[in-house]
Image (tube, rainbow, N blue to C red):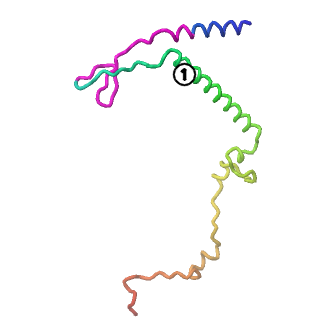
Amino acid sequence: MKARLAAIVVSCVAAAWATLPAHAQTVYRCGNEYTSIPCPEGGRVVDATDPRSAAQRAEARRLAALERRQAEQMKKDRLAAEKADHNPAMVSGFDSRASATPHEAASAPAKSKTKKKNRKDASQDGFTAVDPTTVGKRK
């Protein structure tokens, strides 16, 4: 009962606060900059009042609060799903058969795909380096 009474009081205070007129402040445009201080030269006054009605502003605040609640719920759902799934590879979108976590994979030494015997005998690959200035000249 006390919580409901507190909610009613808060909503009444918020409604009263929303109906108060905003303090008008003069805004000046000086080139590509907006300021509350008049420009030394070439500045102009900009109409910075909110053209929306009080009902439109209240609706915008209501929608923003709803989106904040939805975002918080989505965050809670995501954290719960991550906690339920103990496989960190699946959380990040990788195959569940991956044995290493991303941290372990990054710290593991890189494996060479080239066989060692091919490195020792480079003449088997069919490449021979030639000096282009000696092409066509015989010794």
Q: Is residue 101 above or below residue 68?
A: below
In the image, taking residue 34 as reference, residue 111 lies left or right, namely right
Mark 1 nearby-residue class (10 Å; few <14, some 14–19, many ≥20): few
**Where residue 108 appears, x then y in whole percent?**
66, 55
Residue 71 quadrant: top right
In the image, taking residue 126 as reference, residue 78 lies left or right, namely right
Judging by the rendered image, the residue that carries numbered circle 1 is: 60
Residue 136 quadrant: bottom left
Which residue occupies the extreme left position in the image? 41
Q: Amino acid at mark 1?
A: Ala
Query: Total label count?
Result: 1
**Where residue 46 appears, x then y in whole percent?**
33, 22
Residue 34 counted in the magenta span: yes
Which of 59/78 is in front?
59
Q: Residue at x 29, y 30 (%)?
A: 31
Q: Quadrant of the N terminus?
A: top right
* Element at label 1: helix
Q: Which residues are magenta?
A: 14-40
